[in-house]
Image: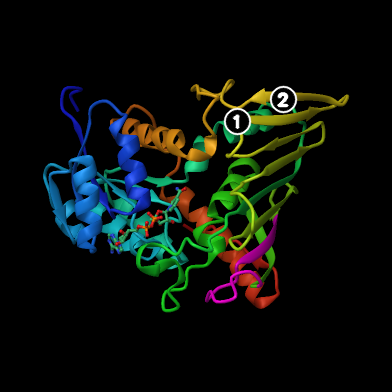
C-alpha cells in the first residue's frame, strides 16, 4: 500500500469500546474511519457524528461489503464476534477483534478456519499485551532476571454492578456471558503470555455479590503448565474496589509485581534488592507518567498501531486466531472445572 493512501477502517459496533478504538485511531496518521454499523440507530448515529464517520448502517455485512473499507474493528458484544470475524475475513478484510475472541471451541475453529483460508490479518485485541507494566514485567521473566518461573498469577477485579452492556447483553440469561471468559480473559491471556500454554485447569466459583446475575461473579482458577510452573487467576466482577489487574510473576531468583492500573512495577531480585521501575521506561515506547495507565487510551492506541503495521506487512501478527483461541480454551476449561468440580484439560487442537 502506498503511504499516501489512507488505511480505511470500518467499525462493527458503536458502543463504548468502539468509541475507545475511534479515539485511538484518530491519533494514528494515515488512517480514516469510513463506516460504522450498530443495530441501535442512536448508538450508530452518535458515534458517527462524534468521529465524523460518513457511512452508517445497522448491518455488519454492509460494512464488510464496502470497497472503502480495508479492515474492520469488531467491538460488538461477544456473541457476535465469531460470525462477524469470519464474514469479514471471507470478504477480504483485515480484522482486529475485541476480546474475548469468541465464546466456544467451535467458534474458535470457525475463526481459525476463516483466517487460514484468507490472505488477511486477524488480530485478537488482548489489549493488556500493550500495558507498559506487563511488557516490562514480562521482560524480567524472558531475560532470566528472576530465574525460573514457578508461579504466575493475575487477578481481574472489576466491579460490574453497573456495567451491563448497552441493552443489557452482559446479563442476558438467554446468552450467558461468563465473566471468567468475558472479563478475566485479560488475566488468563496475561498468565499464558508470561507462563506459556497451560495444560490443565481446576477452579471454584460462587455468586455472592451480584446475586441477581445469571452467572457466577467470582472464580478462582489454578493452571498447570507444561514447564511444571503453576498459574492462578482470580476473577471478581462483583468486588467493591477500584479496577485492578494486579499480577505477580514468581521466579527462583526474584519476583515481579505489576498492574495495568499502575505507572510503576516492583521487582525483587535475589539478595533482597528491590527496584521500583516506572512503567514504560524499558518498554519500546514511552508513556507519560502523569496519566494512569488504566485509562486504556494509550494501550488501545498501541494495539491499533500494531494491527495496522501488521496489515501493512511491516510486522508479523503475533496475536492471531490460534493465539486468541488458546486463551479462550484456557478460560473455558476453568469454567467447566468450576461447574463439574473436576480438573479439565485445556484444549489445544486448533
Ligand atoms: N479491551 C477491553 O479492555 C474491553 C473493554 C470493554 C469491552 N471490551 C469488549 O468490547 C466488546 C464491546 O463491549 P462494549 O463495552 O463496547 O459494549 P457496549 O454495550 O458499550 O457496546 C456494544 C455495542 O454493540 C452493539 N451491538 C449489539 N449487537 C450488535 C451486532 N450484532 N453487531 C454490531 N453491533 C452490535 C450494541 O447496540 C452496542 O452499541 C465486547 O466484546 C467486550 O468484551 C473490551
Relative to 108, is 301 above or below?
A: above
**Circle 1 crowding by C-alpha within 10 Å: few under 14, some 14–19, many from 20:** many
Compared across the picture, whether 220 is left or right of 316 comes to: right
Disc 1 to disc 2, C-alpha distance: 10 Å
In this figure, which residue is indicated by the disc labeled 2?
A: 276
Q: Tell me what residue is drawn at x 18 percent, y 59 percent.
A: 61
Please state the horizontal and vertical placement of residue 85, each as a whole percent of the image: 31, 55
Q: Looking at the image, can residue 92 be seen? A: no
Q: Does the magenta stretch include residue 109?
A: no
Residue 63, given in percent of the width and then of the height, sits at 17, 52
Q: Is residue 210 magenta?
A: yes
Q: Which residue is drawn at 45% across and 64% down?
A: 164
* Most common secondary structure along the magenta stretch: loop
Q: Residue at x 17, y 43 (%)?
A: 53
State whether residue 128 is above or below residue 172.
above
Residue 131 on image: x %, y %: 53, 35
Give the magenta range: 208-223
- 330 w.r.t. 255: above or below: below
Which residue: 19% across, 53% down?
Answer: 45
Residue bearing the label numbered 1: 263
Amino acid at each position: 500500500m502506498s503511504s499516501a493512501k489512507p488505511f480505511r477502517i470500518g467499525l462493527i459496533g458503536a458502543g463504548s469500546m468502539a468509541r475507545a478504538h475511534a479515539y485511538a485511531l484518530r491519533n494514528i496518521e494515515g488512517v480514516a474511519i469510513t463506516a460504522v454499523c450498530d443495530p441501535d440507530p442512536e448508538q450508530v448515529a452518535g458515534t458517527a457524528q462524534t468521529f465524523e464517520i460518513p457511512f452508517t448502517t445497522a448491518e455488519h455485512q454492509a460494512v464488510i461489503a464496502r470497497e472503502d473499507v480495508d479492515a474492520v474493528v469488531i467491538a460488538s458484544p461477544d456473541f457476535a464476534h465469531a460470525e462477524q470475524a469470519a464474514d469479514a475475513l471471507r470478504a477480504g478484510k483485515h480484522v482486529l477483534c475485541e476480546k474475548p475472541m469468541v465464546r466456544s471451541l467451535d467458534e474458535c475453529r470457525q475463526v481459525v478456519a476463516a483466517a487460514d483460508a484468507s490472505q488477511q490479518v486477524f488480530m485478537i485485541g488482548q489489549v493488556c499485551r500493550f500495558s507498559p507494566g506487563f511488557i516490562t514485567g514480562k521482560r524480567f521473566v524472558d531475560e532470566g532476571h528472576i530465574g525460573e518461573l514457578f508461579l504466575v498469577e493475575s487477578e481481574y477485579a472489576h466491579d460490574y454492578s453497573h456495567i451491563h452492556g448497552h441493552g443489557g447483553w452482559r446479563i442476558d440469561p438467554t446468552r450467558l456471558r461468563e465473566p471468567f471468559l468475558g472479563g478475566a480473559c485479560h488475566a488468563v491471556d496475561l498468565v499464558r503470555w508470561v507462563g506459556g500454554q497451560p495444560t490443565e485447569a481446576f477452579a471454584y466459583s460462587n455468586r455472592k455479590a451480584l446475586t441477581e446475575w445469571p452467572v457466577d461473579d467470582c472464580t478462582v482458577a489454578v493452571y498447570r503448565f507444561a514447564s511444571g510452573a503453576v498459574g492462578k487467576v482470580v476473577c471478581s466482577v462483583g468486588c467493591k474496589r477500584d479496577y485492578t489487574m494486579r499480577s505477580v510473576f514468581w521466579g527462583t531468583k526474584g519476583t515481579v509485581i505489576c498492574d495495568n492500573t499502575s505507572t510503576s512495577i516492583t521487582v525483587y531480585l535475589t539478595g533482597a534488592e528491590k527496584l521500583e521501575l516506572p512503567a514504560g521506561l524499558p518498554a519500546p515506547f514511552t508513556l507519560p507518567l502523569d496519566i494512569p495507565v488504566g485509562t486504556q487510551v494509550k494501550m488501545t492506541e498501541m494495539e491499533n498501531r500494531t494491527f495496522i503495521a501488521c496489515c501493512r506487512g511491516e510486522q508479523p501478527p503475533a496475536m492471531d486466531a490460534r493465539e486468541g483461541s488458546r486463551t479462550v480454551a484456557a478460560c473455558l476449561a476453568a469454567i467447566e472445572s468450576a461447574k463439574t468440580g473436576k480438573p479439565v484439560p485445556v484444549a489445544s487442537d486448533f
